[in-house]
Image (cartoon, rainbow, N blue to C red):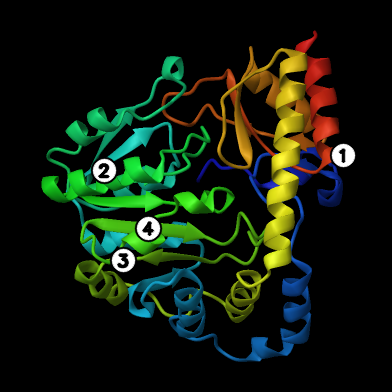
Amino acid sequence: MTGHGGNVFLASDETGIPVNEMLDFSASINPLGVPESVSAVIRENIGLLVHYPEPFADSISRDLSQQLGVPAQSLVCGNGSTELIYLLVRALRPRRVLMPGPTFSEYERACHLNDGTSCTRFDLSPQGGFAIDPGQFVAAMAGCDMAFLCNPNNPTGRLLERKTVLDLVRAAERAGCLLVVDEAFIDFTPDQSLVRDVEGNSHLIVLRSLTKFYALSGLRIGYGIFPDRVVQQVSAHKEPWTVNTLAQMAAATAIRDRGYQERTMEVIFEEKEYLEQGFQDIGIAFFPSSTNYYLLRISRGNEVAASLRKRGILVRDCRNFPGLDESYIRVAVRSRNENNRLLKELGDLCAR
């Protein structure tokens, strides 16, 4: 089993609250929902489900190549970026892998499923705001042949600036360590992305997700940009048909929807300001975030999460993140009405 947010169906079964009445702050998904342009494309092309999808999603790879300004042959698409995490560990078979803690749990799980791969955790401190010290991270890469860096980090929301990450890339090359930068949430700070830096950097892989920013979690699509020296090896281990037809069409449409992208940035910026003020008014400690979620520190956070669940509000209980305990929960940035409901319930529970 995997412990993640977003399981509204299980929560509905356990609480008896219908799925469409649950407020899901546990998964960090765009509150605008599925772009209307994507909904229209799906409605118009539902009949194509009688056909197999492109085995390796070549068309969307070409579209992404044009949008991102990267070579199409460097792209590999997957059933969400999580598929690619497992794929690259399986294909490249690293012996020792470095990763921060806390961070996205699927890095460690992918390594544990691969015989001969061990994990080294780079512990982040709440006293330091869970910031990564670049010099110490470079030192920790010694003896590792792969390192994962989630940027912005999940669940902390902390972002390492692009210049700093490029310094880490150069240090990784000197150390003979392949740096995998997971940019699942970089769309909220697009100028910090390294997608165009993979070409010419033999020790850099960048993973991206289309499910968070475009609210396509149920369709599942992500992609990776790989250097020449590893892309063929990774592709050789890739199963065909893992990205379905509608997911490919949805992705091609979403990445061209400038209006949706601009509106998303406006809404997220406004609602982040609103939530931060609300947290301060209630007296809840939160960590600065560069993306669409916040890590909160609350006395008996796990009990607060359980109480919210009974009220039809899901938040991410963070106890299963290495380095976090029962006092941490993660909440997504949602719509104004939803954020108001969350703040009201948090205020009520924290006042007890």
Q: Residue at label 1? A: 337
Residue type, label 2: Leu
* Circle 1 SS class: helix
Residue 30 horizontal/vertical position (percent)? 69, 52
Mark 2 touches mark 3? (CB < 8 Å): no
Residue 174 horizontal/vertical position (percent)? 12, 47
Residue 338 sits in quarter: top right
Q: CA distance from mark 2 to mark 3?
A: 17 Å
Q: Residue at label 4? A: 206
Q: Residue at label 3? A: 226
Residue 184 makes an appearance in the image: no
Q: Residue at label 2? A: 168
Residue type, label 1: Asn
How crowded pointer 2 is (Cα within 10 Å; few <14, some 14-19, many 20+) is rated as: many
Q: CA distance from mark 1 to mark 4?
A: 35 Å
How crowded pointer 4 is (Cα within 10 Å; few <14, some 14-19, many 20+) is rated as: many
Residue 62 horizontal/vertical position (percent)? 46, 82
Q: Earlier in the sequence, mark 4 or mark 3?
A: 4
* Circle 2 SS class: helix
Q: CA distance from mark 1 to mark 3?
A: 41 Å
Residue 125 sits in quarter: top left
Q: Earlier in the sequence, mark 4 or mark 2?
A: 2
